[in-house]
Amino acid sequence: MGKHDNFIRNETLFGIVPLIKGDRKYGFWDCFLVTSGFAIATWCYEQGAYSAGLVNFQQLIITIFGIGFFFMLLEMLPLWFSTRYGIDLWIWLRAALGKNGVAVMAFLCPVLNFGWYAVTADLFRDSLVQLFGVFGVTIPEVIVPFLGVICVILGVVIALGGPDVIKWASRIMVTALLVVGIIVLFICFSVSPSDITAVQPDLSDYESPIQAFAYSNEGMVAFCFSWSTQAYVLPRLCNSERSAYWSTSAAYGLIAPFFVFLGGVMALAMYAAVGEYTSDPTVMLATLVGPGVSLLALIMVAFANIGTMGNGLYVNDMVIKSAMPKVSYKALVIIMAILISGLTIWGGVSENFGAFISIAAYLQGPINGIILVDCFILRKRKLSLKSAFLLPGHDAYKYPGGVNIIGAISVIVGLICGLMVYNPMTGVIYSDIFYVTTGSGFTLLTGGLCYLILTMTPWGKKYSLRDRDDLEIV
């Protein structure tokens, strides 16, 4: 392969250059497996246990499968059309936010999601601790916080290998996680199913069961929004729009909720068995089964988290490439790994789980609302690819200062409206709207509505729709 071919490959697989259909390596099953590996990461157990501590068994089903499935199908809709152009949605968003506006958001969203990878590294660390414990070895406390960094380092190796390595690592990882999930499911129901469904959460810190249910819904909506940062990227590797949409929607809308549900059932089973909630599958395995089964499952959990880390480093760095396309992919991987390692050693992410996911979702919610309006209502699924890449003579998406003022206002309005309903830092509810839309859901509604109203004015149409004579035929 010559230097020219290497350059093209690097800029398509590790950059933002559009992929033509002949270069797209993923079919439905490839995208589904890679995305499922991402979606069923062991952090799903953390989310499930969080919900299980707030609601009863019936409400748990409604929160996870009803709320989760609806929002995932909704926010994945624009993937049909970014895939058609062979680009990720962050490039499309240049039309709605401007180049510099996207740069800011495409940097902040992955950074706010770094906590997910700290959770992954934490679970890897706990797996190692439990594995050594099976053999009677106690790891000194001073070393334990640093064990998660091993997961980060091994994830870097996978990420630097790119989509081909990630694809094969995901096949192994997904298989391992599915096996662990089946094991966990059987172990959960070794505890009496009636005991599991009878568990009632301790709601002494909440005004009512309805309030706790609303907090659970907020957590699930925020969890769904957290996927959008990554889901905007991988589908560009798919060879058809149908494969991109349905593989991504199935992974995030069905597989991920099932494993979140499994995490919730696991927490309920542990509470029924030993009187304590836990979101850590390694603790459950060590508590409820013999050393042989737990040893095998712990090994699979450990390796699965390495695959998740590698996938996440690749996808999030591709998002940041939308903001800083000239920065080396390898440099971004290493910088991101250092930051995640710092969060892992700190160890405070899991302790502030609810606040962490809502804070990230408050930024992603308005962006999801804006892209839905921009794609389906304003631009009617047609984009100027040349203007999106700011080619000379194609200025439809060049805004003063590189920021689409309508998009920027809409993001700010969505954030402010969300904070007027619910404060994710303190958990204080300010409006009964929270019980209907959740705080994160309200940011999507108000951000999207603001964008729709402003772009439908005569001035807004003139300002935003300068690309109709420069559209691509695809």
Image (cartoon, grey):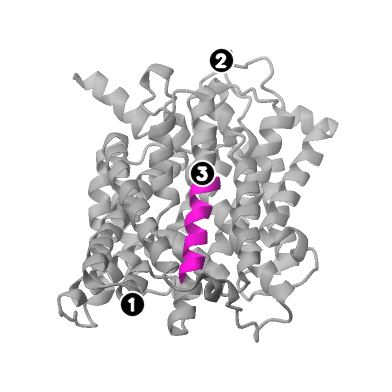
Q: Decide: few, some or many residues near mark 3? Use Cα within 10 Å; few <14, some 14-19, many ≥20.
A: many
Picture disc at residue 474: 2
Q: Residue at x 68, y 69 (%)?
A: 213
Relative to 13, is 66 above or below? below
Tell me the mark number nearer the camera, choosing from 2 and 1: 1
Magenta span includes 337: no
**389 or 55, which lies in front?**
55
Predominant secondary structure in magenta?
helix
Picture disc at residue 103: 3
Is residue 390 visible to us here?
no
Relative to 371, is 52 above or below? below
Secondary structure beneath dot 3 equals helix
Tell me the mark number nearer the camera, choosing from 2 and 3: 2
Magenta region, residue range: 253-266
The residue indicated by pointer 1 is: 287
Picture disc at residue 429: none
